[in-house]
Amino acid sequence: MKKISLNLSKRAWERIMKKRKLLLYPLARKSIFFLAILVLVHPQDLFAERGEVKKFHVKYVCEIKKIPSYSRNLRVWIPYPVSGEYQHISDITIKSPFPVKVTRDPERGNNFLYLEAKKPQFKDLQILLEFDVDRYQVINSINPQKIKELPEDLSFYETYLKASRYVLITEEVRQTARKIVAEKKNYFDKLNALFDYVYENMVYDKSVAGCGTGDVVRSYNVRRGGCADFHTLFMALCYALDIPVKYIGNAYLSFGEPAPDYRPMGFHCNVEILLPGYGWIPLDISHCKKGLMSRQFYFGSLDYYRIQLGEGRNINLAPIQNGNRLPEIDLKPYVEINGFPYENIAFEALYKDAPTEIFDE
């Protein structure tokens, strides 16, 4: 059995042992490898309550096709969700013709299923990942009277204040942000005003050209798009005012629809805002705009039709890829051959509801 070493602080380790059981899974059968995995607890603030739970099973299949005969080095990264306060991942099974390991990037703490093969003698390669999920609603009851102002020294939150090629701050955006909050008396009112600006000025429309890119300039001018367009515009407005914000990538389940058989998952993002006195709280402006649940609910709370994959825009993988930083954590695997991005890949991310237990009287 190949030992996996994951660097954790003493505090994080004590928290893991207190809240989660150590789950180990059997290895190896001929050319199929089953990885021994430690289910990690992703550090989060614990101010929110767990709401109702949704239980389901996930099957993820990644295929790398027509691998060139001259391939010297094949590298594969697959997004790898881990357990946290609001989702529990269990019964993990991984099948691969080469050994795989779970990696964690030091910049943002995102986890990946990583494979590296020297001179692979395969025309096609398939990796299968399956696991069970218990996903809980995130419920925050926010008392505005308890909200404090941001600290003057924000150096600790530097990662969540950085503009990048994927979150640009133009002078027009900066001026708009200042105008939105000009007459707001406190930090909480400013956050609400920024939320309302994006909600009132953006139309949820995935048919518009450029939808889903999260291009701030396009979103600001066109005022239409999907979740990435809503939330990246919100991030840019926050950055312009030195407000820390996280971009959260999720696998998304069909909202409110039963899934007795496998059906595809999509991608959905939301953001988290630093709220002194509460910690990081979630916002989901695009789901609010779609009318899935109320504005009051999505300012601080989340539904359970999602699996959190990771966070951030302009990200590096672990180990770091040779190519450019990626726009975000999403469902799609990332592959490099001989140090260059390889696009001849296919994947399916499927889920189905867990069977309901029936007990005899």
Image (spheres, rainbow, N blue to C red):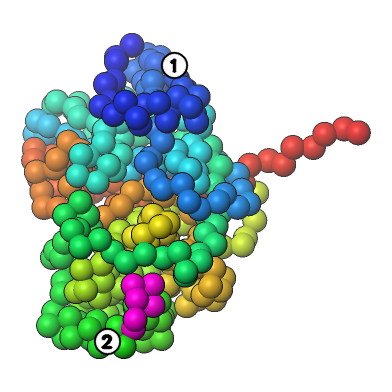
- Left-right relation of 178 to 356: left
Q: Which residue is mark 1?
A: 26
Query: Which circle's residue, 1 or 2, is located before the other in the chain?
Result: 1
Q: Visible in this render: residue 246?
A: yes
The crowding category of the residue bearing disc 1, from other C-alpha atoms within 10 Å (few below 14, some 14 to 19, many at least 20), is few
Q: Is residue 97 above or below residue 127?
A: above
Q: Which quadrant is the C terminus positioned in?
A: top right
Of 264 and 322, the residue lying toward us: 322
> Residue at 26% across / 71% down in the picture?
238
Q: Quadrant of residue 112?
A: top left
> Residue at 25% across / 75% down in the picture?
237
Report x, y in % for residue 349. 43, 48
Q: Indicate whether residue 65 is drawn in magenta.
A: no
> Residue at 51% across / 38% down in the picture?
88
Q: Is residue 118 above or below residue 254?
A: above
Of 227 and 11, the residue lying toward us: 11
**Start-end of magenta stretch:** 184-189
Q: Quadrant of residue 147?
A: bottom left
> Residue at 8% across / 38% down in the picture?
338
- Give residue 182's mark: 2
Q: Give the distance between the C-alpha atoms of the residues marked 1 and 2, in whole angstroms.
A: 59 Å
In terms of secondary structure, where does tag 2 sit? loop
In terms of secondary structure, where does tag 1 sit? loop
Q: Which quadrant is the N terminus positioned in?
A: top left
- Left-right relation of 195 to 73: right
Q: Amino acid at mark 2?
A: Ala
Q: Are marks 1 and 2 in contact (CB under 8 Å)?
A: no
Of 280 and 102, the residue lying toward us: 280
Q: Amino acid at mark 1?
A: Pro
Q: Is residue 199 above or below residue 248?
A: below
The crowding category of the residue bearing disc 2, from other C-alpha atoms within 10 Å (few below 14, some 14 to 19, many at least 20), is few
| Numbered disc in front, either 1 or 2 | 2
